[in-house]
Image (cartoon, rainbow, N blue to C red):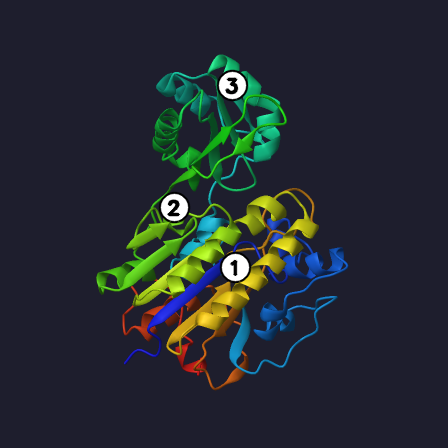
C-alpha cells in the first residue's frame, strides 16, 4: 500500500548549498549559493524554509538552525558530470549523465552551424555570442526589427537561444526557426541540451520586454525515467514550469506553463486543491534565470522570501497523505565570477502532515533518490538502467 497518495516535488532552480568535492574541476572554488546570498543581505526572512531545516544545511547569517519538529532534511550530491539544468533534473528521475552537454559560452556557435541556420531559415544571424537576454535585446533588437535579421545567442548553459519580436518577426516564424535550429544541433559536435525561443515585445531601446511565450526544444531523455514509469502505471504526472520542456514531454500527463516563479507556486497551490493521484513536479526558474545568472544576490534573497510566503500557503492545505519534497538541480552562486551555474550540493527537504518523525538524513551520493523514493511509494519498479535508491523508509 502506498504511503502517500500525492507527491509534490518543487525544484528551487539553482539553490545550491555548498561546493561539491569535485567543484574545482568545473572551475568552481568556494561556491555556496544559499550561504553567500545570506552573507550579501542585511535582512533575510524564510521562516517556513527554516522550520523545514534549510538553515541546518549551511550556515546562514540571519537564520539560525532549527530543531525540526516534523519532517526531514539532508543534502544530495550530483553523480552526473555536469552542472546543467537537464543533467540535474534527469538525474533526479534516475538518469546519470556521463558526458556534459556542450556549451559555446566562450566562442559562440561555429561558422558552419550559423551558415546552415541562415540558409535554412532565410534570416541573417546577428549576435552569436554569450549574453544576457535583456542586454542583447537592448543591443540588437532594433536592428532585428528593422532588417528581419535573427538574434542568436547562448549563455553559460548548453543552449542556443533565438529572439523574435512578436509583432515583426512573429511567434510562428520564431518557432519555425527554432525547430530548424533543433534539427541542426542534433549533430554531435553542435549538440546542445536545449534550443529556446525567446519572444519579446517593444519597439525601441528601454521598452523591450520578454514574454511568457518562451518555448524550449529539448533533447529527449536518453532512457526511461521515473516519470515514464509513473505514467505507464496510470498515475498522474503533472508538470509546472519548464519541467515539460526539460523532459520533452516524456512521462508527463498534463503540463502547465508558468509566467514566473511566483506564478508557478500559485499553480502548485491551486493543484493541491484538486484531486489527483501521483506526482506534481514543479520548477521555479526565476531564481536561476533572473538572479543567479545575473549575479544579483539581493534579488535572489527577495525571491526566496516571496517563495517562503507561498510555501506557507501550500503547507496549510497539504493533506495527511501528501508528501512535499523541496530540492534543487545545481547551484548558481550570485556572488561568484562569470555567469555560469556552479557545481554544488543541493538540499533535500521532505515534509508531510502525517509524519511522526523528524531530523537529518544521511548525505546521498545522487539526486536520483528523489525519483527512486517516488517510485517505491507507488509500488513501481524504476526503469532498467536508472540509478538511485529509495529513502522512503526514512520518511516516517
Q: Give the vertical position of 65 relative to 204 (above or below).
A: below
Q: Position of residue 139 (x, y in %)?
A: 61, 24
Residues at marks 1 and 3, CA–CA distance in whole angstroms: 36 Å
Q: Nearer the viewer, mark 1 or mark 3?
A: 3
**Can you see residue 208?**
yes
Residue in view at x 51 percent, y 18 percent: 145
Task: Label 2: state its secondary structure.
Answer: helix
Residue of label 3: 144
**In the foreground, 250 or 258:** 258
Residues at marks 2 and 3, CA–CA distance in whole angstroms: 27 Å
Q: Position of residue 266 (x, y in %)?
A: 47, 57
In this image, 147 relative to 380: left or right? Answer: right
Q: Give the vertical position of 2 relative to 120 (above or below).
A: below
**Can you see residue 91?**
no
Residue of label 2: 245
Asked if the residue at tag 3 contacts the one at tag 2, i.e. Cβ–Cβ closer than 8 Å, the answer is no
Q: Position of residue 142 (x, y in %)?
A: 56, 19
Residue 383 sits in quarter: bottom left
Residue 308 sits in quarter: bottom right
Residue of label 1: 328
Amino acid at each position: 500500500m502506498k504511503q502517500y497518495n500525492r507527491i509534490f516535488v518543487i525544484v528551487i532552480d539553482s539553490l545550491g548549498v555548498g561546493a561539491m568535492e569535485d567543484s574545482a574541476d568545473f572551475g568552481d572554488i568556494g561556491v555556496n549559493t544559499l550561504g553567500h546570498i545570506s552573507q550579501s543581505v542585511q535582512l533575510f526572512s524564510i521562516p517556513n524554509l527554516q522550520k523545514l531545516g534549510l538553515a541546518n544545511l549551511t550556515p546562514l547569517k540571519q537564520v539560525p538552525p532549527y530543531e525540526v519538529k516534523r519532517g526531514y532534511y539532508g543534502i544530495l550530491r550530483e553523480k552526473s558530470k555536469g552542472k546543467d539544468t537537464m543533467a540535474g533534473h534527469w538525474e533526479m528521475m534516475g538518469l546519470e549523465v556521463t558526458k556534459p552537454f556542450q556549451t559555446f559560452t566562450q566562442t559562440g556557435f561555429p561558422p558552419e552551424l550559423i551558415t546552415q541556420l541562415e540558409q535554412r531559415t532565410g534570416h541573417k544571424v546577428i549576435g552569436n555570442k554569450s549574453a544576457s537576454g535583456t542586454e542583447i535585446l537592448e543591443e540588437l533588437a532594433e536592428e532585428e526589427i528593422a532588417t528581419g535579421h535573427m538574434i542568436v545567442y547562448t549563455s553559460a548553459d548548453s543552449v542556443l537561444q533565438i529572439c523574435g519580436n512578436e509583432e515583426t518577426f512573429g511567434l510562428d516564424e520564431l518557432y519555425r526557426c527554432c525547430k530548424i535550429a533543433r534539427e541542426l544541433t542534433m549533430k554531435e559536435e553542435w549538440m546542445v541540451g536545449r534550443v529556446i525561443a525567446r519572444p519579446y515585445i517593444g519597439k525601441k531601446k528601454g521598452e523591450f520586454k520578454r514574454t511568457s511565450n518562451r518555448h524550449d526544444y529539448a533533447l529527449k531523455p536518453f532512457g526511461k525515467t521515473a516519470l515514464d514509469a509513473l505514467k505507464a502505471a496510470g498515475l498522474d504526472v503533472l508538470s509546472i514550469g519548464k519541467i515539460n520542456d526539460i523532459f520533452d514531454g516524456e512521462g508527463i500527463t498534463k503540463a502547465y506553463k508558468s509566467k514566473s516563479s511566483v506564478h508557478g507556486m500559485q499553480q502548485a497551490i491551486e493543484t493541491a486543491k484538486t484531486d489527483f493521484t501521483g506526482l506534481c513536479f514543479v520548477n521555479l526558474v526565476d531564481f536561476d534565470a533572473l538572479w543567479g545568472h545575473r549575479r544579483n544576490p539581493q534579488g535572489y534573497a527577495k525571491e526566496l522570501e516571496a517563495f517562503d510566503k507561498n510555501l506557507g500557503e501550500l503547507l496549510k492545505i497539504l493533506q495527511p497523505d501528501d508528501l512535499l519534497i523541496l530540492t534543487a538541480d545545481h547551484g548558481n552562486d550570485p556572488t561568484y565570477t562569470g555567469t555560469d551555474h556552479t557545481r554544488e550540493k543541493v538540499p533535500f527537504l521532505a515534509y508531510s502532515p502525517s509524519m511522526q518523525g523528524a531530523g537529518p538524513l544521511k548525505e546521498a551520493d545522487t539526486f536520483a533518490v528523489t525519483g527512486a523514493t517516488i517510485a517505491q511509494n507507488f509500488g513501481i519498479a524504476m526503469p532498467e538502467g536508472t540509478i538511485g535508491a529509495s529513502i522512503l523508509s526514512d520518511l516516517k
